[in-house]
Amino acid sequence: MEIEERLEKLISLRGPRAANALRDDAREVSERLGLTAEFKVLDGLIGAMLGTHPAKVLGSRQALARAHGLPYDPQRIELFEKIAAQLRGQSFSDIPEPALRGAPRDMFAFVESYFSNYIEGTTFTVEEAQDIVFNGRIIPNRSEDSHDIKGTFDAALRDPFYSQPPATADDFLTWLQQANAMVMLARKNRSPGQWKVEANQAGSTIFVLPELVPETLRKAWSMMPLLEHPIQRALFAMFVVSETHPFTDGNGRTSRLLMNAFLSQHKQCRIIIPTAFREDYLLSLKAMSHQGDATAYMRAMGIGQAWAGELNYDVDVPGMNQQLDDCNAKQEDTRAFRLLSPKTLKPIGVEPARN
């Protein structure tokens, strides 16, 4: 089993050519040392994992998955199981969606798309974003950025991406590709809607390798039935996509759209992460990636949902902009400014209720 796991890691990181090179070296050494029987075993394992020998000689799940053309990331699956268990053990409050239709629904999608793009570095003033979303204006020299925010707005506003999350593993993969294609439509050089072909990372976090993406997502989806409350499913789905990072670009925006679709499906308030809370959000994702601890994540997303639920969406854009200014939502200096409750203008903080 240990040899198979090491071979699987070698093939994942360096490809079949590295496994074949190892086999060639082992053949030469085995002839000199009289270890032909041992080489025959290794040859059979490598051949089975590369699909040229029968797979019946394999014993580990990862090796068998590789042999059948369905390789996945076992460490990520273990992490997802751990996060799912923490979410399952936590109860959450029901916060009704505050803007179900008409102009308030448009305003909610506007605020959501504005901040979801700001998190990723696609920054505009609220007035510029208003021109893009509601007036169809493309900001000079920023065509791709303009389309990013408009694509996110359209996806957050209308089905299937507004309130129709995937129902099966196949739907899951298709939904993600279609949502990413919509958000990243203008960035043809980033292959919108296509699985990544090169490894990607953020800081010290190396995401799931390209060839492991589809089956890793499928295996993660099989855990969804264990999660009953809409926000449990929403938070799990968002983390799976964020941690897998299946696309070249637009992974964060795609993952947050998926999260919110699960919430809107049950008329629960969608989650918005304002700029003033960006650092808390990103640190909570890092804590899950590196420590497998969802505590900060559950708290951060609870705050994002509670904050979004307190805004008044039955206003025009200047009125919304005033609310955002009043509660420090657009502030980038988190040492000097804290996110405030839109209702009380006091620091906002919530803890998910425990069972």
Image (cartoon, helix red, strand yellow):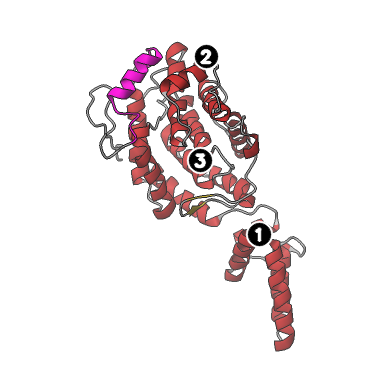
Label 1 sits on what residue type? Answer: Leu
What residue lies at 51% left-to-right and 25% top-to-bottom? 156
List x then y, in percent, for residue 117. Answer: 47, 31
Badge 3 marks a residue whose secondary structure is helix
Nearer-N-terminus badge (1/2): 1
> Dot 2 lies on which element?
helix
Cα distance in 3D space between marks 1 and 2: 54 Å
Q: Quadrant of residue 103?
A: top left
> Badge 1: few (under 14), some or many (20 or more) residues near its Cα, within 10 Å?
many
Q: Is residue 296 above or below residue 315?
A: below
For the residues marked 3 and 2, what is the alpha-carbon distance in whole angstroms?
39 Å
State yes or no: residue 185 in magenta. Answer: no
Residue 320 rendering spot, x and y as whole percentages? 36, 18
Q: Is residue 194 above or below residue 314?
A: below
Residue 135: mark in rendering: 2
Query: Residue at 26% of width from left, 34% of height from top?
Result: 337
Q: Earlier in the sequence, mark 1 or mark 3?
A: 1
Q: What kind of residue is marked 2?
A: Asn
Which numbered circle lies on residue 108? Answer: none
- Write down the region rendered in magenta: 313-332
User: Which residue has dot 3 on it?
Assistant: 224
Q: Quadrant of the N terminus?
A: bottom right
**Residue 324 percent location from the top left of the image:** 33, 23
Would residue 279 be visible to someone looking at this image? Answer: yes
Residue at the far front: name it.
141
Residue 220 as seen in the image, left or right of residue 103: right
